[in-house]
Image (tube, helix red, strand yellow):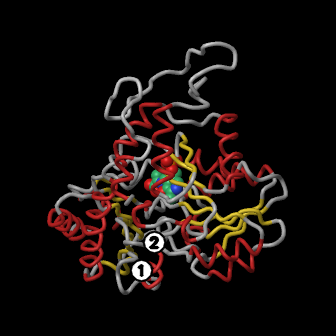
Amino acid sequence: MKFSTKAIHIGQDADPTTGATVVPIYQTSTYTQEEIGKHKGYEYTRTGNPTRAALEQCLASLEDAEHGLAFASGLAATSSVLSLLRPGDKVVAAADLYGGTYRLFEKVYRPMGISFAYIDGRDPDEFGHAADSDTKLIWIETPTNPLLQLVDISAVAEIAKAKGALLAVDNTFASPYFQRPISLGADVVVHSTTKYIGGHSDVVGGAVITSDQDVYEAVKFYQNAAGGVPGPFDCWLTLRGVKTLAIRMRQHEHNAMRVAEELIKHPLVKSVNYPGLTEHPQHELAKRQMDGFGGMVSFEIHGGRDEANRFFKNLRLFSFAESLGGVESLACYPPAMTHGSIPKEERERRGITDGMIRLSVGVEDIEDLIADLKQALAAI
Ligand code: P1T
């Protein structure tokens, strides 16, 4: 079955009791059991819920994987993968990553005795150099947030295998429509389903997807034991979003490409990060490991915080907001927003300067979006 069909059908058979064509919202915390130890497969919604199960099956199939587990947020999903680690274990992570993930690593898991080494993910050899016998997990995003750098998933998967570490890929920016890391050798995929998968900026959620039975069982145990599960209505909203993922992603990409091409010509723009541009240093890798380039664009302006602020204040269509992946276009200022939890020196060392702007290009009419960006740049 092909992607768009799976998005609409997997996990979404007609409801066995009523025939409802659309998976119902099973808004119940508990299930009446027939006798001790005899029930219809569900006991308590933290442990399992049919609406959540539908979403989990659908997401697993979209990533060409065996198992999916849904969480209350992307960070809850990330945390469930980190729960596999024990004090003394080490994580090697590509340095460019969502600020909240960095905060979770540094402020929650490092004090618990896990160590984190950050390397330039663009060079696969760096993972090999940084990984030692304590390394249990390699963590990457690709494309990265916010610099749109790429990590070679197959190359890093081989290194992870040789070192006996798991490779986890945060696939939020690409979405499974454009990239399926498990097919490229990754062990675990994490999503903030808040973004492209939900697609309408109206629900927060996360997912862990894997074909590794041991990882699945450990993360499922954690999901039930720690309890960071999404409610049935949130699962239903996310599943509703998933149905149109393919057509939305195609339009996001089409619009992002046009935006990147316009920005790169603009005199006030210093540089543009978009994997679809032939100028992107990893454009060839993008073509190899992705089926498309996505809807995220970041760029640096000639100027700093004040100029960026004038740009944001003058936008009319793009909302100045955190998050990404919804149908509406958003503009964000990583140094103070998504990556504000990374100390300034560390942030700048990683290339997130005060002139950096990130766009989540939505699916509105492209001429309107370009006109909005041009008039806001003119106000700088
Ligand atoms: O917000 P939450 O659903 O918990 O997801 C966290 C997360 C994980 N991974 C990536 C790549 C992300 O971008 C995020 C959340 N990011 C934003 C809110 C943002 O604006 O970048």
Q: Position of residue 346 (x, y in %)?
A: 61, 68
- The residue closer to the viewer here, 379 or 175, is 175
Q: Is residue 159 above or below residue 78?
A: below
Does 233 sit left or right of 48 as displayed? left
Label annotation for residue 287: 1
Percent from the top left, x then y, of residue 294?
37, 67
Q: CA distance from mark 2 to mark 1?
A: 14 Å
Q: Quadrant of the N terminus?
A: bottom left
Label 1 residue near ligand 1, CB within 8 Å: no
Could you tell me residue 103's position as x and y percent?
62, 54
Residue sitting at 70 percent across and 39 percent down?
221
Q: Which residue is mark 2?
A: 148
User: Mark 2, residues whose alpha carbon is within 10 Å: few (<14), some, or many (≥20)?
Assistant: many
- Residue visible at 51% across and 38% down in the picture: 53
Foreground pick, 13 / 53: 13
Amino acid at pointer 1: Lys
Secondary structure found at label 2: loop
Which quarter of the figure has residue 233? top left
Quadrant housing residue 101: bottom right
Residue 337 in sight: no
* Quadrant in the picture for the C terminus: bottom left
**Labelled pair 2, 1 in contact (Cβ < 8 Å):** no
Image vertical order of residue 307 relative to residue 313, above or below: below
Counting from the top left corner in percent of width and height, residue 211 is at: 61, 56
At horizontal 24% and vertical 69% (from top left) the residue drawn is 377
Near mark 1 (Cα within 10 A), the count class, few <14, some 14-19 or many ≥20, is: few
Q: Secondary structure at mark 1?
A: helix
Give the number of the mark in front: 2 or 1. Answer: 1
